[in-house]
Amino acid sequence: MVSLFHRFNNFVQIAPLTLVLAVFLVTPMTIILVVSFYKFTGFLTIPGFVLENYSRMLGQVFTYQNYWATIRITGITWAITLVLGFTLSYFFVFDIIALRVKILLFLLAVVPFWTSGVVRMISWLPFLGREGLINRSIIGMGLTDQPLDFLLFSEFAVILSYVHVFTLFMVAPLFNVMARIDRDLLEAARDQGASGWQILWNIIIPMSRPGIAIGTIFVVALTATDFTAVRVLSGGKAGTVALTIANQYANVQHPFATANGIVLLLVLLVFVGGLMRLVDVREQL
Amino acid sequence: MSDSLGVLLVIVGIVAVGLYQLVRSQQAQGAGRAGSMKVEVRRTRGFYVRTGVYVVFLVFLYLPILVIGILSFQGPTGGLTFPMEGWSFHWFREVFDPTYIGDFRMPWVRSVILALIVMVITTIVSFLAGLAYRRGFRFSGLIFYLVVASLIAPPFLVSMGIGIGFAKLGLLTSWWTGTLGAHLTWTLPFGVLIMLAIFSRLDRSIEEMARDQGATAWQSMRHVVLPIVFPGMIAVALFGFTLSYDEFPRSSLVTGDGNTLPVEMVAVTGTAARPSLYAVGTMTTVFSLVVIFAGFAAVYIISRRRAGALTVAGSVPEGERYGKALRGAPEQPAE
Amino acid sequence: MSAVTEGVVEIVSVSKNFGPTIAIDDISLTIPDGSYCCLIGPSGCGKTTILRMIAGHEETTEGHVLIGGRAVEGLEPSERGTAMMFQSYALFPHLSVADNVSFSLKMKRVGKDERRRRAMEILTRVQMDHLADRVPQQLSGGQQQRVALARALITDPKVLLLDEPLSALDEFLRLQMREELRRLQADIGITFIHVTHTQPEALALADLIVVMDEGRIDQAGTAREIFDAPTTSYVAEFMGGWNVFRGEVREVKNGTADVLTEAGETISMTGTSVAAGEHIDFSIRRDRIGVARSNGAGAAVVNGVTGVVHGIEYQGTWVKVTMAREGDAGLLVANVQEADFFGDPVAVGDPVKANWTEKDIHILSR
């Protein structure tokens, strides 16, 4: 009788979460999946089951250009956030001893991430434009004659914005993992003749792998699926998958948008699944 | 070169120097303590490089926000970038008394109310889920993967799905139905993961001891578990509020007629951006900072009252290490 | 400088400060080549700090450390000819046992096959070769310790530094490993410096015991010297096995000195050449005290005290009798031979007198 009470208790406890996820995640995704097989006549979406949305998409060069752009942008963003995040993490964990200072410096770097990402993205506009702050400064200082065009309405701006907004997602898990590295291990490595770089490469980085994996999952998922920065900061020039999906939806081409979306989701799940297999993520909790 | 740039650089310079001094003061202290061992710090060249990276990163983070903060005070005839045509509150006024498209007042109210609702729901649901995981249940693995999936799923797709779903049901999406659900798919993963982490560090024997002392399950929950877990719940509440308040992509298609603030801001950016957008941006940033500060203050005050160790939500308490053997046995005097 | 003295460790007027705290206060010590030296003392006495300064994980504030006659200031830990075994073992969790052991070779860019060969060689020596491909988490505490030992020894050090190596082991394993360490040291012949807070351990293992307190060396000597002839009351009390008395000589009459102890009792002793007015610290070994029933209180004794039995602990070959001295003067502990005790066993509460001979009175310097 006790176990029945507990089983009911458990059920009540996990029901809300399950309910929300079922209604607002699973169902919408299923709907998307279903709609992706609907027929599109050029104007209307008709319920049915056709594969041509997918075949059309996979047959277009445009699709692969999209994916290449997405991979390129995501990849560069990931690389930059990884190096930057790792360095910052290292700084917090190993360079700063006093706990108070550590917390202060960490908070200083983290607080901006709790403000609106939209605002932060917009805040690059006055910087990067032709009339923007950077161009005015370098022209004013006499470094160049012409304003740098690539600063705004380019992939550069998009990547810059992503790094600005997403680096925290790399820093946090890395910090978490690095802080748990037993300092004795570093000393033992030194005792064994390891130089600073060798310690980094042979001890710290391997032991940080779970953090790197989690950070990567976050950054990749956030970057590959974002279209706002692409639209605003690149003027739509950087043709990523996410942007295409958003455009297709805006053009009421639902079957195309959803088919595209399903493929993107699958690619993402495969990537994340693969990473999670390499690293036991649950342990990190 | 505009003089506003000069002002900006001075501010940045002061902050950067101040931080650098703060970090350098570490060196003057000399040694610190790591656990029970006294550890000396070796200030290698790498340290200075990394400090430099940190300072540059801070500037990188704060400068854009500072810039639009300054531009919010743009003169009435001024444009979206420098130079500053005088200083005024004109654009702030326009936010509160809009004549052009882009009324931010109602969106802000909606965002705040929605964020509060999301905050409450997220905290409660995450807490319950944490309890459930503590005891273990069937399909716990599946639910966990769903939670992670919710985190990485393309937010735009979620929005699309909800939008289409509602349409099929003949319902109109609005900010407090579809958007609420969309926000929850974003905040709940964070809340649940944080609660899982906190609960996993909660020693079971504490509850057992309470039961031993005659507490019922409910009393044990109220007087033992809840107080210990409470700071973490505030962290979850904070996450819930700010994540919802700032959320954009998930909300973008399901707000219906009434936009939330981020949705409204993006809409305006694309079409009729004016410095009033900066003014809104500045104000909402200040608002966020106030909320965060209040949250941290709450955690701090509660922790201080407990006279326990101070921990920051999401960071690792000092002293947790991997790979440690048992520490030494107590002294044994010879006979 | 011949090869024989490569493992000599000389500590010359070394001090160590951590900010305002003085951890080591002007210590000088010579540890002979090939000896087994134990640094013993309570937590915070500085023994681990000394070890770390020899290792190079800590630098001296003042003074010099010489290893094999060579000053080692500024040298990296791996350049000093020392190897350290950490209290927590500090095995790399992401590497196998073999990779852990051959880590130092990898740092020197030794080839993979050579590394494997040498790792297996040393693992065989510590009987861990069959677990070469396991990961540290899969090993027991004792096994981890052997791996840590192997990892230290593979660097061919002249001095092996052990930081409380046996503290994390259970009793049985501790005694076993103690023997193995001793045998290993005799086998390899290098200098072992072993930090511990366990007295029997130091007595069992060391050629040279260094008793430390608050950053200073109280006494350094062989095990017998330390145990049987402690020079200070601190050493006597710390190493155990003694009852320590501190007091002032009141009167000397016919070769009998009356000492008023700090505790307020008067003890009469013979055979010592002290004068009235002198301060005197002395101690009596616990196993040199005879305990007998007394037939009433107040009977004056020479070279003894009277009191009441406070506690009795059977320890197999001996019985620990704790006695409450008269006049609330504190406790006296006597380790009575089993046969002697059970000849006329006393019980808690019985009035007794404790006696010793004059040659068992050991004078301490302070």
Image (cartoon, rainbow, N blue to C red):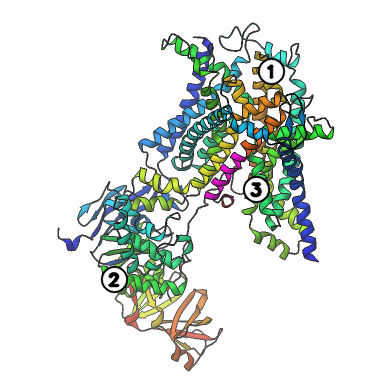
Q: Position of residue C79 (x, y in %)?
A: 26, 51
Q: Residue C5, relative to residue A162: is it above or below? A: below
Q: Residues within 10 Å of mark 1 (few under 14, many from 20)?
A: some
Determine which of the numbered discs, if any, sits on residue C222 in the image: 2
User: What's drawn in magenta, residue-wise?
Assistant: A266-281
Q: Position of residue B16 (x, y in %)?
A: 48, 26
Q: Position of residue A261 (x, y in %)?
A: 65, 34
**Chain letter, disc 2 residue:** C
| Residue at the spot of label 1 | B268
The residue shown at (55%, 25%) is A158
Residue type at mark 1 is Val
Give whichever of C236, C127 is nearer the camera: C127
Q: Would residue A233 be counted in the magenta stretch?
A: no
Determine which of the numbered discs, if any, sits on residue C345 in the image: none
**Is there any visible trace of residue B247 in the rendered image?**
no
The CA distance from mark 3 to mark 2 is 64 Å
| Residue at the spot of label 3 | B145
Q: Are marks 1 and 2 in contact (CB under 8 Å)?
A: no
Q: What is the magenta segment's predominant secondary structure?
A: helix
- Mark 1 vs mark 2, foreground winner is 1
